[in-house]
Image (cartoon, rainbow, N blue to C red):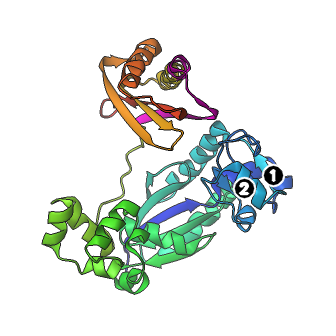
């Protein structure tokens, strides 16, 4: 008998897979994508690595130089955002051509909802359609909730299908640390540990009122819901609309000149504004991110007097936000992020 299921579709080694499609001779070789592709330039990090590179311990977020030391025979390639966006668009169009409700969650993942009595057959059908139409492979997690589906994907990788339901959730996840739950980070895990809660089962059995007192009336009970397998939030077919756009630069050498720092912030604010204005969007806020040589990181945000498409106006406001920082240490990283006005409903 058909009943509702949620599938989480997660493309395998997406960025590396796109690069291999463009360069078939790289198939089967360790491939690392990140920065400008030069592992000897400092302060560049891995965006993704092929499974062959991961076998050498290469991981996303790792410095490119560390990746090169672990796998000097890897092929290092620069990130190519337009290529990944185009490949992602083909994937999402393929999913939307099928009898499922699709909710995008980024370049390389989406939720798909359907009523079926054979969810695993549907998952295999999705996998085959993506291979046929995009030449990309994916892993699929199946669940009764988004959390169950996304968690199941972790057991399906690479290229497989796995299922988690309320009936199997605690047996599968109960002994695992709370940080294994999608939505619980290290900081929340540490706060839970202060209450003697370290596993998913312990969180599922925790006192509702105590969680509310410690984490607030909304977050506290939500943490327990996560431990029980997630809520029944539906998959939404609404087209994803970006709420912000950002640009960050990690510098090869720390910056200690206020004028140089200001010039970089103004330039990034203008560049990111020009990019969103080209897409027909207007800017309402601008944020500045600063990371010092000690790795202390902070962001501050300012609202514009009115939504604007003027890059110079956004740059001026970004500099006003920058002035709120105490720049008493050399700067390692700078970033500018613009918050966008949402389009009118139905547009």
Residue 212: quadrant of the picture: bottom left
**Residue 33 image point, x, y percent:** 70, 49
**Residue 87 image point, x, y percent:** 63, 46
Q: Residue at x 41, y 22 (%)?
A: 318
* Residue occupying the far bottom of the picture: 171
Comparing 86 with 47, the one in front is 47
Comparing 149 with 214, the one in front is 214
Q: Where, quadrant-wise, is the C terminus in this rendering?
A: top left
Q: Which residue is mark 1?
A: 75
**Residue 311 image point, x, y percent:** 46, 16
Label 1: which secondary element: strand
Label 2: which secondary element: helix
Q: Closer to the camera: disc 1 or disc 2? A: 2
- Cα distance between the residues tagged 1 and 2: 11 Å
Q: Residue at x 19, y 59 (%)?
A: 218
First in sequence: mark 1 or mark 2?
2
Question: Is residue 255 found left or right of 192 in the rendered image?
Answer: right
In this rendering, the answer to whether 288 lies above or below 103 is above
């Amino acid at each position: 008998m058909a009943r509702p299921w949620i599938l989480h579709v997660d493309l395998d080694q997406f960025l590396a897979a796109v690069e291999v499609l463009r360069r078939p001779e790289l198939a089967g070789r360790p491939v690392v994508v990140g920065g400008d592709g030069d592992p000897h330039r400092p302060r560049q990090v891995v965006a993704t690595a092929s499974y062959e590179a991961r076998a050498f311990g290469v991981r996303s977020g790792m410095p490119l130089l560390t990746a090169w030391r672990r796998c000097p025979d890897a092929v290092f390639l620069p990130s190519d955002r337009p290529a990944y966006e185009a490949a992602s668009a083909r994937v999402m169009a393929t999913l939307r051509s099928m009898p499922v409700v699709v909710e995008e969650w980024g370049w390389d993942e989406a939720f798909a909802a359907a009523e079926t009595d054979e969810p695993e057959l549907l998952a295999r059908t999705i996998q085959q359609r993506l291979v046929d139409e995009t030449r990309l492979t994916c892993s699929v997690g199946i669940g009764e909730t988004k959390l169950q589906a996304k968690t199941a994907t972790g057991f399906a990788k690479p290229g497989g299908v796995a299922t988690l339901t309320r009936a199997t959730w605690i047996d599968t996840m109960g002994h695992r640390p709370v940080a294994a739950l999608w939505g619980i980070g290290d900081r929340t895990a540490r706060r839970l540990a202060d209450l003697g809660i370290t596993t998913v089962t312990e969180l599922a059995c925790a006192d509702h009122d105590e969680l509310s007192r410690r984490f607030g009336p909304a977050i506290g009970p939500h943490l327990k819901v996560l431990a029980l397998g997630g809520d029944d939030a539906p998959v939404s077919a609404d087209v994803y609309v970006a709420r912000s756009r950002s640009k960050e630069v990690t510098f090869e050498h720390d910056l200690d000149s206020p004028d140089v720092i200001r010039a970089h912030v103004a330039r990034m604010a203008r560049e990111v504004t020009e990019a969103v204005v080209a897409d027909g969007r207007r800017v309402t806020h601008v944020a500045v991110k600063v990371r010092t040589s000690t790795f202390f990181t902070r962001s501050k945000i300012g609202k514009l007097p009115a939504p604007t498409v003027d890059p110079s106006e956004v740059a001026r406001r970004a500099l006003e936000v920058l002035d709120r920082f105490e720049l008493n240490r050399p700067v390692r990283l700078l970033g500018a992020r613009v918050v966008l006005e949402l389009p009118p409903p139905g547009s």
